[in-house]
């Protein structure tokens, strides 16, 4: 007959699970806060989703533009990841602004 040991049940294990759940929740909240606080004023790297949020265009459009060379927005390849500099995105917007006047 095979003997299996069982982990004791009770508060110590529940406390660990609760702690892990709280840590996961805090991590998700932190990443959501970082995503929503992305602006052109920062000089940081962002992924395709972050760039699409800043430019208010679908991520699929950026992927297409990278593939075809259309609109020529600079991007950085880090391994297989694609990143955009926020300053390059801001420059793109400024180049495509029509009728802007310096006041």
Image (cartoon, helix red, strand yellow):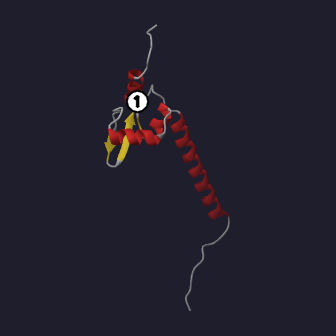
Q: Is residue 9 above or below residue 86?
A: below
Q: Residue furthest bottom?
A: 1
Q: Is residue 82 left or right of residue 9?
A: left
Q: Nearer the viewer, residue 56 or 10?
A: 56
Q: Nearer the viewer, residue 93 or 45?
A: 93
Q: Residue drawn 41% across and 23% down?
A: 96
Q: Quadrant of residue 20?
A: bottom right
The residue that mark 1 highlights is: 89
Q: Is residue 99 left or right of residue 81?
A: right
Q: Residue furthest top?
A: 103
Q: Nearer the viewer, residue 57 or 41?
A: 57
Instruction: Indicate the secondary structure of the residue bearing disc 1.
Output: helix
Q: Residues within 10 Å of mark 1 (few under 14, many from 20)?
A: some
Q: Is residue 26 above or below residue 55?
A: below
Measured as percent of width and height from the top left, residue 95 is found at 38, 22
- The quarter in which the N terminus is drawn is bottom right
Q: Quadrant of residue 60?
A: top left
Measured as percent of width and height from the top left, residue 6 is found at 60, 77
Q: Residue drawn 34% across and 49% down?
A: 80
Measured as percent of width and height from the top left, residue 53 is found at 50, 35
Q: Residue drawn 50% across and 33% down?
A: 56
Total count of labels:
1
Measured as percent of width and height from the top left, residue 74 is found at 33, 34
Q: Residue drawn 37% across and 29% down?
A: 88
């Amino acid at each position: 007959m095979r003997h299996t040991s069982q982990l004791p049940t009770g508060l110590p294990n529940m406390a660990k699970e609760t702690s892990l759940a709280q840590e996961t929740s805090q991590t998700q909240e932190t990443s959501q806060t970082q995503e929503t606080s992305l602006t052109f004023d920062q000089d940081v790297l962002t992924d395709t989703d972050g760039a699409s949020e800043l430019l208010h265009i679908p991520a699929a459009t950026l992927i297409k533009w990278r593939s075809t060379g259309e609109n020529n927005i600079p991007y950085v390849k880090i391994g297989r990841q694609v990143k955009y500099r926020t300053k390059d995105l801001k420059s793109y917007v400024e180049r495509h602004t029509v009728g802007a006047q310096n006041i």
